[in-house]
Amino acid sequence: MAKINPHHSWLPLEERANDVSNPRHKAMLAQVRDHMCFEIKGQLEELLGTLSPRANYHFYGNAMMNINGPAGIREFYTGLIASGANQFEVDIEKIVVDDDNVVTEGKVRQIYTAREVAAMGVAEVNGEALSDDGLYLTSTQLITVWPVDDDGLLLGEDVYLASDPFADCQKVTPADLPDYYLYEDRM
């Protein structure tokens, strides 16, 4: 059985959008759902189409990072998709929506190759040296605030990681991944 299924990430947003009656809230939830779907499927232009030209990104946790403006965001997503790191899963546990924001909380899981893990300064996992052909599953709790403009476009993301995703890293095999999961080009 697969330990990660990226395509499940947007289903709770779709379900919640179907359950709300407020038209703005419904549209905002659908916009976040579409954004996650396009990101995970690697559909760059559609993904960028969900964002306001005024969008900014803020990442909080081990590695603080800000990404500002359309050019920076395009560069970020182009690199993310090229590396295959867009194939994460967020097991969404909570969704909060008001007139200006959607907030999601859940466990994020992501697969990295040994080369990618080593590039982040990790030399071993659970006391074992990284293997050249190894695949590693990371996870942490994640809260994302998705501000939305008056036109229904996302103003970016404020991403909060509860802990270092590599702190509870585990080695996995290709059998642990869905058939469609792309990782070979990253080895």
Image (cartoon, grey):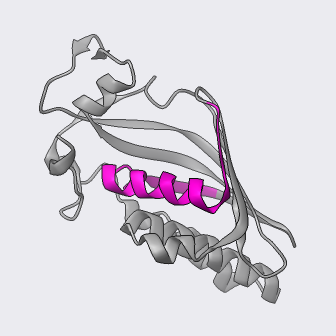
Q: Residue lying farthest top?
A: 127
Question: Is residue 22 shown above or below 168?
Answer: below
* Residue at x-position 79% and y-position 89%: 23
- Left or right: residue 56 versus residue 46 is right
* Residue at x-position 53% and y-position 27%: 164
* Residue at x-position 37% and y-position 57%: 81
Residue 176 on the magenta segment: no
* Residue at x-position 59% and y-position 78%: 15
| x and y percentages locating residue 115 in the rendered image | 24, 30
| x and y percentages locating residue 62 in the rendered image | 59, 26
**Residue 158 shows in the view:** no
In the foreground, 72 or 82: 72
Task: Give the quadrant of the N terminus.
Answer: bottom left
| x and y percentages locating residue 87 in the rendered image | 37, 56
Residue 87 on the magenta segment: yes
Question: Is residue 55 shown above or below 22?
Answer: above
| x and y percentages locating residue 10 in the rendered image | 51, 69
Q: Which residues are magenta?
A: 64-93
- Left or right: residue 26 versus residue 117 is right
Task: Give the quadrant of the C terminus.
Answer: top left
Q: Residue lying farthest right?
A: 99
- Left or right: residue 113 versus residue 88 is left
